[in-house]
């Protein structure tokens, strides 16, 4: 053929049905549709420009959601173009492509080795002819300010320690990619008091130093449910006073949203931040409705602390359920706020009476121990064994449940808690070689009251191989109301009631701690055992755990 027909360039058509290009629009994120036609070949892809032919990007799609770059301007007029590419390439990779008189970069390739440069053998799109008259249109954009608000289901509790978590919500009609920063301020909205965080920040936790004194301190800002350190602190957290957190969003034109507040300043809600009484030493989580008449607090007031002459009277208390404490925590921030609070303390008492929230304990206590914390856990249960979420208790050093239940009359039954004799002793286990110093220092016997039949109940557990037994329930004596020679009661045995894990950072008991303060018949305090004087064995036990065992360096064995 003497006169071959030259390659014909492809044609491009853009479709935009939903945007009125004659007027200003306030949405920079939009979906474009286009089509390409090549009269003598095939279309292999498309170039598109969102900035009036300044830069080009490649795609093989015919539908694309794009974000128009506003270049930090409040108003902008730009032109959008699309150009089809046909398959009449030169058969080699071109590192420079000239289009409309301008170098637009290299041909598109698959970077198989992720080194950022084209290597021989990597797949690429061989650009042929590019539509010399790309289809396009002008668009006029008027920026809109973003909208910021706090998650409605995450209202801050009325009273907290210097630890608080918040869920931030918000949007920008111009598209989420146009957001520049999250900004927060505490109690004072003067410009110098605002801090900036990444635009995708959705969960923030403010954590003050629990040892700090004074009326106003700075708080560290933690991000996300994983409580990642941001390296940023926020000023003006007031101690023993009411606080307000302010929040706004900033877009890439520096337009700011209206300021949102938590608590909402249009309501009567308040947020009181109390200084830590223990300086981050000991936190007591009450994982139940109050029913112990503050007897646990009374026990701690008597327990000698690590500093001579002091006790645990100034422990910090947090109630998960009781509204009298004004600490009811919304479900949406419950886990994050509790984790952050617990991690602020060196030692923890997790204290549940009956039917506590075991799942939340499972989510927090192992996490806390992993971070170097020490925990004394008391959890009691009543009812059928099948109602007990035993899987959620796997963080405890227990293997299984004792299955026998002995009622006052009738045969033994399976699947319920063990009924044990009132006014009996907890008897110390024989010290093991590795833990002999600690166990030997404990009272030999601890007086108890009924655990079952009144307000308290428990399952007794079979310890796991990762446990050291500290106390068992003693055998009934022959002159008891329930004598040992009556077959019905001979099966009671000596169930384990207090044990410790092998890492020695967790002590677990099913016995209500305040009930250990009861004086068994014929016993009075002060009491002398093996040459040692105990004013109250329960007080002595708690003090030994907190002040001796939990003061050991955190080590793995």
Image (tube, helix red, strand yellow):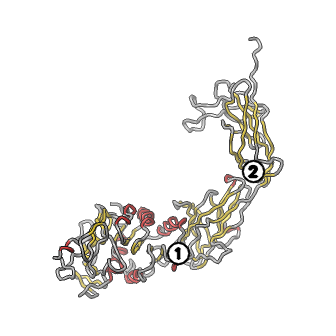
Rendered image: mark on residue 402: none
Q: Residues within 10 Å of mark 2 (few under 14, many from 20)?
A: many
Q: Quadrant of residue 536?
A: bottom left
Helix, strand or loop at mark 2: loop
Split into 4 quadrants, where in the image is the N terminus? top right
Left or right of 428 on screen, residue 188: right
Mark 1: few/some/many CA within 10 Å (<14, 14-19, 20+): some
Q: CA distance from mark 2 to mark 1?
A: 45 Å
**In this rendering, the label closer to the viewer, 2 or 1:** 1
x then y, percent, for residue 133: 79, 33
Q: Quadrant of residue 412?
A: bottom left
2 and 1 marks in contact (CB < 8 Å)? no
- Considering every residue shown, the one lying at the far top of the view is 2
Of residue 29 and residue 188, the one placed in the foreground of this image is 29
Quadrant hosting residue 516: bottom left
147 w.r.t. 322: above or below: above
Residue beneath label 1, please?
Answer: 327
Q: Which element is circle 1 on?
A: loop
**Position of residue 448 in the picture relative to residue 21 (left or right):** left
Question: Residue 342: x and y, percent?
Answer: 47, 69
Report the residue at 72% width, 43% height from top.
32
Q: Position of residue 473 (x, y in %)?
A: 26, 74
Q: In this image, 261 relative to 514: left or right?
A: right
The residue shown at (77%, 35%) is 134
Q: Is residue 150 above or below residue 101?
A: below
- Tell me if I can see residue 311 in this picture: no
Front-most of residues 58 and 398: 398
Which residue is the site of mark 2? 70
Compare marks 2 and 1 and give the one earlier in the sequence.
2
Image height check: is 267 above or below 154?
A: below
Q: Is residue 287 visible?
A: yes
Q: Residue furthest right?
A: 22
């Amino acid at each position: 053929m003497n006169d071959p027909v030259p390659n014909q360039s492809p044609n491009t058509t853009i479709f935009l049905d939903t945007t009125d290009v004659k007027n200003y629009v306030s949405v920079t994120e939009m979906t474009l549709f286009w089509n390409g036609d090549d009269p003598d070949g095939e279309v292999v892809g498309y170039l598109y420009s969102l900035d009036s032919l300044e830069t080009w990007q490649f795609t093989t799609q015919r539908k694309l959601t794009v974000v128009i770059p506003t270049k930090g301007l409040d108003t902008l007029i730009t032109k959008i173009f699309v150009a089809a590419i046909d398959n009449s390439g030169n058969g080699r990779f071109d590192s420079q492509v000239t289009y409309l008189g301008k170098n637009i970069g290299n041909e598109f390739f698959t970077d198989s080795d992720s080194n950022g440069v084209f290597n021989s053998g990597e797949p690429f799109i061989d650009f042929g002819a590019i539509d010399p008259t790309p289809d396009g249109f002008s668009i006029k954009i008027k920026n809109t300010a973003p909208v910021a608000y706090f998650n409605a289901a995450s209202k801050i509790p009325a009273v907290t320690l210097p630890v608080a978590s918040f869920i931030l919500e918000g949007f920008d009609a111009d598209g989420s990619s146009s957001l520049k920063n999250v900004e927060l301020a505490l109690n004072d909205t003067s410009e110098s008091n605002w801090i900036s965080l990444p635009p995708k920040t959705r969960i923030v936790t403010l954590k003050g130093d629990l040892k700090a004194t004074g009326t106003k301190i700075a708080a560290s800002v933690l991000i996300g449910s994983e409580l990642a350190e941001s390296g940023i602190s926020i000023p003006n957290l007031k101690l023993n006073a009411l606080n307000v957190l302010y929040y706004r969003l900033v877009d890439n034109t520096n337009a700011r949203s209206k300021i949102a507040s938590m608590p909402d300043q249009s309501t009567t809600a308040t947020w009181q931040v109390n200084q830590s009484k223990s300086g981050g030493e000991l936190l007591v989580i009450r994982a139940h409705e109050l029913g112990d008449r503050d007897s646990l607090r009374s026990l701690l007031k008597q327990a000698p602390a690590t500093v001579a002459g002091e006790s645990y009277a100034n422990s910090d208390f947090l109630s998960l359920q009781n509204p009298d404490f004004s600490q009811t925590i919304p479900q949406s921030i419950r886990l994050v706020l509790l984790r952050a609070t617990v991690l602020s303390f060196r030692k923890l008492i997790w204290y549940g009476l009956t039917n506590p929230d075991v799942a939340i304990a499972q989510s927090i206590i192992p996490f806390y121990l992993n971070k170097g914390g020490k925990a004394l856990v008391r959890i009691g249960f009543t009812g059928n064994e099948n109602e007990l979420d035993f899987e959620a208790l796997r963080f405890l050093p227990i293997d299984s449940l004792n299955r026998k239940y002995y009622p006052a009359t009738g045969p033994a039954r399976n699947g319920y808690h063990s009924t044990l004799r009132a006014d009996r002793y907890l008897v110390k286990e024989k010290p093991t070689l590795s833990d002999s110093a600690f166990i030997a220092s404990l009272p030999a016997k601890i007086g108890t009251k009924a655990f079952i039949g009144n307000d308290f109940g428990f399952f007794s557990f079979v310890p796991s191989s990762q446990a050291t037994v500290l106390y068992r329930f003693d055998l009934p004596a022959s002159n008891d109301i329930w004598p040992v020679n009556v077959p019905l009661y001979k099966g009671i045995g000596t169930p384990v009631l207090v044990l410790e894990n092998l890492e020695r950072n967790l002590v677990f008991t099913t016995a209500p701690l305040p009930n250990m303060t009861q004086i068994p018949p014929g016993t009075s305090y002060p009491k002398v055992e093996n040459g040692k004087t105990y004013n109250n064995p329960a007080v002595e036990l708690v003090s030994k755990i907190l002040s001796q065992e939990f003061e050991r360096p955190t080590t793995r064995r």
